[in-house]
Amino acid sequence: MEPGLLEVFQEQLLLQCEYTMYAAADMNAAIDRQDVKRAFYAIQCLLTAAANASKALWGIKDTPPEQRKPLRDSIGVDDSSPLKSVRMRNHYEHFDEKIEAWWTTSRTRSRIDRNIMPRTALGGRLDDGDMFRNYDPITKELWFWTERFNVQDLVDEVQRLIPKLEAELAKVRGQ
């Protein structure tokens, strides 16, 4: 990757990491205020910014993995990074498909959505497929159906990357 292109990718990745952190702060503030709608808005923003970071680091389907390796190497990111997976973001982005699938597979067509509570508090009253978005503030896990995603792991990774990106950009700019 040419140095100028690497710098542009580092700048954009830093921006998406900062957006992820803004969204995390907004999510926590909304949870503290018990504003569920605003908390899930922030979660959706967090997932989108993190997915944009993932696209910068790994590209999309047709991007050869080695094409973005210089960017990953410049800041010490490997394939075990929580940023790599965009599955949870996809649940949010493709909600229409999820609703259609739920409608055709649910036994009861009962559902719960946008909950901020430990998943165990639901006490097995519904099938997993009837539980849409749930955030557990204790474990920091975001659930959609049976899939879970640890938001804290993602935030920790972004916090680790921000100073590395800032340092790389400072080197390029002679600071």
Image (cartoon, rainbow, N blue to C red):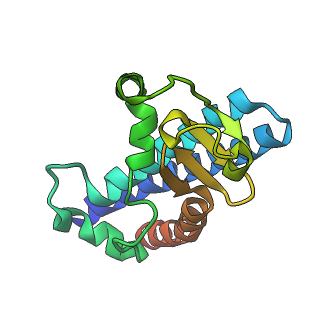
Residue 117 screen position, x and y as percent: 74, 45
What is the quadrant of residue 111 in the picture? Answer: top right
Residue drawn where x is 68% and y is 37% of the image: 115
Residue 118 screen position, x and y as percent: 72, 51
Give whichever of 18, 24 is nearer the camera.
24
In the image, is 136 to the left or to the right of 43? right
Picture mark count: 0
Give whichever of 171, 158 is nearer the camera.
158
Residue drawn where x is 83% and y is 35% of the image: 34
| Any part of residue 52 in sight | no
Residue drawn where x is 33% and y is 51% of the image: 55
4 over 167 or under it: above or below: above
Residue drawn where x is 34% and y is 70% of the image: 72
Query: Where is the N terminus found, in terms of image quarters?
Result: bottom left
In the image, is 175 to the left or to the right of 24? left
Residue 18 screen position, x and y as percent: 57, 51
Q: From this viewpoint, which residue is outermost toward the right?
A: 33
84 over 131 or under it: above or below: below
Give whichever of 167, 20 is nearer the camera.
20
| Any part of residue 14 in sight | yes
Residue 46 screen position, x and y as percent: 56, 44
